[in-house]
Image (cartoon, coloured by chain):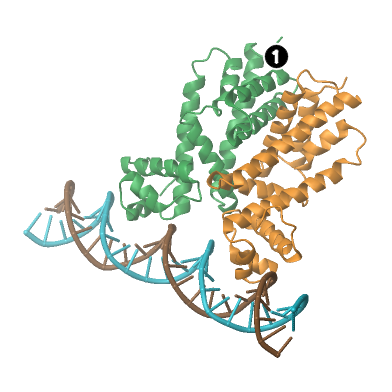
Chain colours: A orange, B green, C brown, D cyan
Amino acid sequence: MNASAPVSERVAVILESACRVVARDGAHGLRMAAVAEEAGVSKALVHYYFSTRRELLRHAFAFSEERLAAAVEELLAPLPDAAARLEHALLASLDPEPPWSEQRALWNEVWSTMRFDDLLRPLVEDAYRAWVERIVGLVRGGAEDGSLAPPADPVATGWRLAAAADGIDSMLYLGLLDRRRARELVRGAIERELPRG
Amino acid sequence: MNASAPVSERVAVILESACRVVARDGAHGLRMAAVAEEAGVSKALVHYYFSTRRELLRHAFAFSEERLAAAVEELLAPLPDAAARLEHALLASLDPEPPWSEQRALWNEVWSTMRFDDLLRPLVEDAYRAWVERIVGLVRGGAEDGSLAPPADPVATGWRLAAAADGIDSMLYLGLLDRRRARELVRGAIERELPRG
DNA sequence: CGCTGTCCTGACTGTCCGGTCAGTCAGGCT
DNA sequence: AGCCTGACTGACCGGACAGTCAGGACAGCG
């Protein structure tokens, strides 16, 4: 199975099933048999396309990440300015609906697995970095289109905002706060970093 | 095995071994045989004290968390004011030395396991909440002893700071930034939330 | 028609590992 | 002495599960 190969219908079904299983049972709970059943195919077919369990997990993550990037694009594109895009981007992961919720679960699971999979780790790393870079880009964009006050250090601001959103996400996941409060905190972080001018 | 029972020497050795194994092999990679070997006892003895693998994991986490709380106390007590304590508390988890590093690994692992262990989850929840409350307390303390500017909403400030520190921690863990940069970002977050003056 | 390659399956295997159990041993009590 | 108990062990069991394999179905093509 090649990472950049065009996915056939069957392969897509298997990858989607794998994503659902991971979101439901965890990365460690990913069973080839469960994926096969979910996809309505034999276990051996899953092995036919993905020789090992690890490989399947990697491809499932990449597949899901790719779909999510498209969803983010779709979410942000119609928004009027960088300020709105920044806010929506930071709030998106708090959304209890798929694909956000499922991706959140996938991340949680993959996070603990990557330590033991040298090929998975760079995937996670790149995805996270791309996410932070997107935030930094929006901070810069806000300064350019005038929708946000230009910060002294846009890069540091972007990283801190991404970090804060991530931490709040964890708190929400753990049930330490409710969604409303989580959104408030994220908005508060934006205001602190980028006071309306 | 009772949660609040005083731990005998043997039990402590087993729990320490379990912590090391989890930090090394992951929560999912926690093998009774590995713990037994590490502790220099038979596998059956581990089962004698902790009837199931899950129970061992829970006790190991609680044990470690307790030791960490003591270490935090020891770290913060000699500091002159709340401002210094807040900074050190938020920076502590970035420390590459035990017990911080080991606890960090333990958290990472337990995080993904708790979803499937209803008894573990509240332990993690309480530990996290206690941590955030401690930060909030330090923010308040800083306003009282005059070492920090009093924020409009100390609770929100505390939560945001804890969240940001947590997120930066994740980024460091993933290797997206180096320790120096991580410390800078944490300090920057404190300045943003609690400007000197 | 037969040949070949792709897609696909059921049945099987080897291994790993949590948990059990029968039993040993040291030490305290009567 | 005999008896009991708590700590401890080696050997074993049974289930779960990744990965294999021999082969079937079927299309395209000569």
**Front-most of A24 and B84?**
A24
Horizontal side of residue B64 vs A29, given as left or right:
left
Percent x, y for residue B74?
46, 22
Q: Relative to C3, does residue A27 appear above or below in the rendering? A: above
Whether residue A96 can be seen here: no
- Other residues around mark 1 within 10 Å, as few (<14) / some (14–19) / many (≥20): some
At horizontal 73% and vertical 66% (from top left) the residue drawn is: A10
Percent x, y for residue C3?
65, 81
Percent x, y for residue A145?
91, 26
Horizontal side of residue A123 vs D10, given as left or right:
right
The residue at which mark 1 appears reads as B149
Chain letter, disc 1 residue: B
Number of marks drawn: 1
What amino acid is found at the position of numbered circle 1 in the picture?
Answer: Ala
Q: Relative to B71, does residue B47 appear above or below in the rendering? A: below
* Quarter of the image that includes the C terminus of chain B: top right
The quarter of the displayed image where residue A166 is located: top right
Percent x, y for residue A14?
69, 63
Per the image, label 1 sits on a secondary structure element best described as loop
**Front-most of B124 and A189?**
A189
Whether residue B41 can be seen here: yes
Horizontal side of residue A158 vs A171, given as left or right:
right
At horizontal 68% and vertical 56% (from top left) the residue drawn is: A19
At horizontal 73% and vertical 38% (from top left) the residue drawn is: A130
**Front-most of A193 and A35?**
A35
